[in-house]
Image: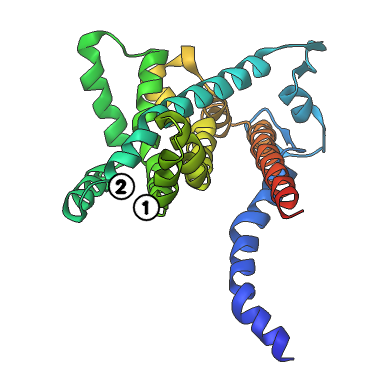
Amino acid sequence: MLTVRRFFATLGPGTLWLAAFLIVPALVMLGYSFLTRTDLAQVGGPWTLENWGRVFGYDALFQEWTADNARVLWRSVWVAGLSTALCVLMGYPLAFYIARQDARRKNLLLLLLIIPFWTNFLIRVYAWILILRPFDLVPSLSATLLGMVYAFVPFFVLPVYSSVEKIDWRLLEAAQDLGAPPLRAFMTAVFPQTLPGLVAGILLTFIPALGTFVVSDILGGAKTALVGNLIQNQFGQAGDWPYGSALSFLLMGMVLLGLWSYARRAGQKGLEELV
């Protein structure tokens, strides 16, 4: 009895929260994906697989396969991957720079890093229109990438900074004493210690970048429409909630598949190290 009470006292509230605000809404959205949009932009029966056919490129009206969704998905993955890579190139050395400062300067730099969060996200994105308009970069893919890097680089820097703060620099000194060149000493003694933060930063950057629609809609226009824009349009202007639900589940499935693949590889690697 005590064990049951302890379970509900610890895991119970979190489980109820996840069930109420994650599992139940996801199941409702899954049910919507099998419904039909009527001519009056309403949702009802009969149950159908047509929305899932459209997601994978089959047009039931013309009874033919199209690659429109595949192109949008590929563009979304490519843009999210490129913006994440830019965040890595910019944020990884920045995390080291901040972590190596004295306490007062470190706190100031961290404040400057997170201070944009004090302003509404839409206002910050619209501000880039004023900045980039004299250079005739709006709308464009370059503006979209710049906006995404600006929006997500703090999510990458903070977990990497947390890992850098815990580095045992004695390992670097030992590698240097053993004659390792600077780059090799860094890659063998320092870089592995930052991997947890690096992986967390990549996930926290790539996943929201994959589903974003605000930045690409404002700074990119129709030419750089991503899967997030397609989903947002179905729930908004088009009013096709069943199709939008199916697209949302496809995107969620892609993210979960990537996370599961990473977790499985990380688990196998940890098991091999233990053996």
Residue 246 screen position, x and y as percent: 70, 34
Residue with the mark numbered 1: 165
Q: Which residue is mark 2?
A: 99
Q: Earlier in the sequence, mark 1 or mark 2?
A: 2
Residue at 77 percent across and 29 percent down: it is 52
Kindly identify the amino acid type of the residue bearing the numbered disc 1.
Answer: Glu
Query: Residue at (64%, 52%) from the top-left corner?
Result: 25
Residue 21 in which image quadrant: bottom right
Q: Determine crowd level at label 1: few under 14, some 14-19, many 20+ residues with C-alpha closer than 10 A.
A: some
Q: Is residue 17 visible?
A: yes
Location of residue 244 in the rendering, given as x and y in whole percent from the top left corner: 63, 33
Image quadrant holding the N terminus, namely bottom right
Q: Is 244 rendered above or below residue 75?
A: below
Q: Nearer the viewer, residue 173 or 83?
A: 173
Furthest residue toward top = 136
**In this view of the protein, can residue 42 be seen by the observer?**
no
SS category of the residue bearing label 1: helix
Contact, mark 1 vs mark 2 (Cβ under 8 Å): yes
Q: Secondary structure at mark 2?
A: helix
Q: In this image, 251 relative to 66: left or right?
A: left
Query: What is the three-letter code of the residue carrying label 2?
Result: Ala
Give me the disc on residue 136: none
**Residue at image coords 42%, 44%:** 172
Residue 22 rendering spot, x and y as whole percentages: 62, 55
- Above or below — where is 197 with respect to 212? below
| Left or right: 188 as drawn, with respect to 39 | left
